[in-house]
Image (tube, rainbow, N blue to C red):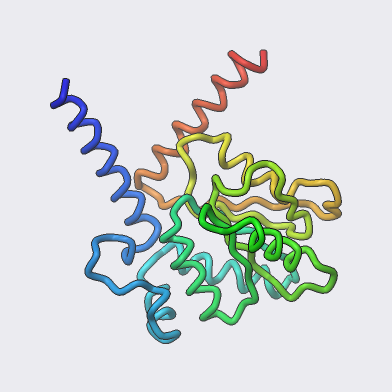
Amino acid sequence: EAAGNRAVGGLLNILGELKKICNHPLLLGTGSPALAECSDAMNIAAAEESGKLLLLKRLLRRLKDEEHRVLIFSQSVKMLDVLASFVRSEGYAWQRLDGSTTSVSRHQAITAFNAPGSKDFVFLLSTRAGGLGINLATADTVIIYDSDWNPQNDLQAMARAHRIGQKKTVRIFRLVSAGSVEEEILERAKGKMVLDHLVIQQ
């Protein structure tokens, strides 16, 4: 039994590492410097090392030109650190909320983002942080940077922009690395949604 538990733990650890590879190479190991501590020049170079981040870079530029406002979700706090450094180096005004954000800071960030005439373009959020009470209806675009095994968590994240006061069509982008463990995660999530519909909702 102990050996079986170790095997399961080892498998979960491997899956976690594979997800990190999909998100950004700097998340692997402890030898690489934290992106948040790098210079802007190093941040720009680091973006070129990740297919996802490179795609996000191009996508955000287009969304900015079209005057959209964006919510970006990730499960990983370290990935949020990477994204925070990235959007800062790109010159975007932004806010952030994760599990370590205090209630006061959370209220200030949401109020600043939703304020009339706010210059904030991006709001970075942990997929599972904040509960159901967050209303970010001033955003009209949601980007799921990395999908959750539990599809309900992603749906709850998408709902942040689908709130009372939303006046625009909300667009959802989900970034998935082709031929990777992320495709398996997405397929599992779809299967869970089908079961939820057949067993619970019916």
With 30 as the anchor, is 26 left or right in this view? right
- Residue at the location (54% across, 56% down)? 98
Is residue 42 placed above or below 66 in the rendered structure?
A: below
- Residue at the location (38% across, 81% down)? 38
Q: Residue furthest left?
A: 3
How far across and down, in percent of the image, does residue 61 sit? Answer: 61, 74
Q: Name which quarter of the figure residue 8 lies in.
A: top left
Is residue 32 placed above or below 155 in the rendered structure?
A: below
With 94 as the anchor, is 111 left or right in this view? right
How far across and down, in percent of the image, does residue 16 sit? Answer: 32, 46
Instruction: Out of 179 and 190, give the one closest to the viewer.
Output: 190
Q: How many marks?
A: 0
How far across and down, in percent of the image, does residue 35 sit? Answer: 39, 73
How far across and down, in percent of the image, does residue 99 sit? Answer: 52, 52
- Residue at the location (54% across, 78% down)? 88
Quarter of the figure with the C terminus:
top right
With 19 as the anchor, is 162 left or right in this view? right
With 31 as the anchor, is 62 left or right in this view? right
Instruction: Out of 201 and 65, give the one closest to the viewer.
Output: 201
Quarter of the figure with the N terminus:
top left
